[in-house]
Amino acid sequence: MDPFVTTLGIRTGIAGWKLLQTKAAKDFPVLTKDPVVQREIAYFRQNASKALTPEKLLADRRLQDFALTAFGMSSQIGMTGLVKRVLASDPDDKTSFAAQMTDQRFVQLSRAFSYGVTPEPSTPATPSSAAVSVTSFYSGSNLAGFSGAFGGVTVPWVDLTSVGTWSGLASALQAGFRRADGNRSDITVTLDGTDLKFTDAKGRGGPAGFAWVPNSANNAGTPVVSDPFNVAAGTPAGPVTGGPAVTKPAFVEQVVQKYLEAQFEVVLGNSSNTLRQARYAQRQLPNVTNWYSVIADRPLANVIQTVLGLPTSFAMLNVDQQASALSKKMKLEDFKDPAKLEKMLTRFITMAEMNTNTQSTAVTLLDTYRSTSIVNLNLSSGSSDSFSSSSSAALVMSTAWR
């Protein structure tokens, strides 16, 4: 469903285009506060995570409309069978249905929602570990305190003045680390003979900055603590990968922003379809990987054909011929260069405006000449007008200046 708002108050032509380079869809409150836009965004945020299969996403018409609109595929709304096969595909499998589609938007849709990617289970953490050896430790020869980091947890100070046994030392250090770790029990400090063994079950990293402070009240020397040894940094657990992306809040917000941009372009088109196509092309062209994707996407094809000055009949050629011709005139790599893309789109807007003005002038002249009987372009009964609008404009203008 289109927004209620019908205009954004943006000028047409190059002036409007320059303004658009400094603005995002979210910068227009008239759009973001539109009742339709707000209602559909709220519905998607609330219900997207429940659509764990392509069937569930497409069965809810509002979710289907939202998703396809966001990805510039509103023309596919209602084509449930086709879209289902696309969503169920693994985009990285070159033999999959989505990967074989000419239009790259299908691959983008499949990859984004990730329904066809087999989930990989999470990988368990490899614990971090380290040990220190403590000697000459007994009553009258103990430590005042400890500071350091282990498992990514920093302990600024542990008071050890009242600790006189190895087991007491292990208990005091473990308690200090657990307090600093939010009272979780992942870090343990155990005694192995006269060695203290540090372990972090989450694999968050090894020891760093261990400092042992002697007790000034000792009357029998100072304990000796070795540098950490048997150090293993460990590895944190790996998250589940693959599977439906709708379960991830960050992805849902990405789709929301895409939807907002798509609706922005819809409203923009009410005032200037040229600016709408330019804005759309600016977003889509950097992602294309072949000319067939451009040919299959009519707004993109129109932008390129206008820039190159190709006639409307060009679109009637075999797609292989079109792709071959376009590849000789432009490089896909240039679309990834912001400066080159901006230059091309500025040219498109200029040429599109010129074409519009020329056609408008031609129609005005034609109406004038018909009313004054200066020229009569009426065709005989049964015949059809084979002139394009640009051809008609050229004919009228040539007649006018004879």
Image (cartoon, rainbow, N blue to C red):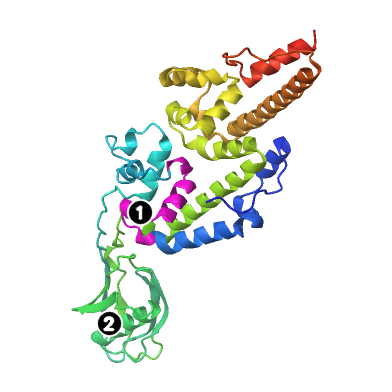
Q: Which marked residue is nearer to the observer: mark 1 or mark 2?
A: 1
Q: Residue at x 24, y 62 (%)?
A: 124
Horizontal side, residue 366 vs residue 195: left or right: right
Q: Callout 1: 10 Å neighbours few (<14), some, many (20+)? A: few
Q: CA distance from mark 1 to mark 2?
A: 59 Å
For disc 2, the marked residue is: 170
For disc 1, the marked residue is: 59
Which of the 4 image quarters holds residue 31?
bottom right
Report if residue 336 lies within the magenta region. no
Whether residue 219 is visible? yes
Horizontal side, residue 149 vs residue 117: left or right: right
Whether residue 248 is visible? no
In the rendered image, the residue lying farthest to the front is 381
Task: Tell me where the magenta segment starts and ends, as one range.
Answer: 49-76
Q: Is residue 105 above or below residue 157?
A: above
Q: Residue at x 48, y 17 (%)?
A: 325
Report if residue 75 lies within the magenta region. yes
Dot 1 amino acid type: Ala
Dot 1 falls on a residue whose secondary structure is: helix
Indicate which disc, 1 or 2, sits on the residue closer to the N terminus. Answer: 1
Q: Which mark is residue 16?
A: none
Question: Marks 2 and 1: in contact by CB < 8 Å?
Answer: no
The prevailing secondary structure element of the residues shown in magenta is helix
Q: Nearer the viewer, residue 118 or 183?
A: 118
Q: Quadrant of the C terminus?
A: top right
Dot 2 amino acid type: Ala
The image position of residue 83, as x and y in percent, is 36, 43
Dot 2 falls on a residue whose secondary structure is: helix
Q: Callout 2: 10 Å neighbours few (<14), some, many (20+)? A: many
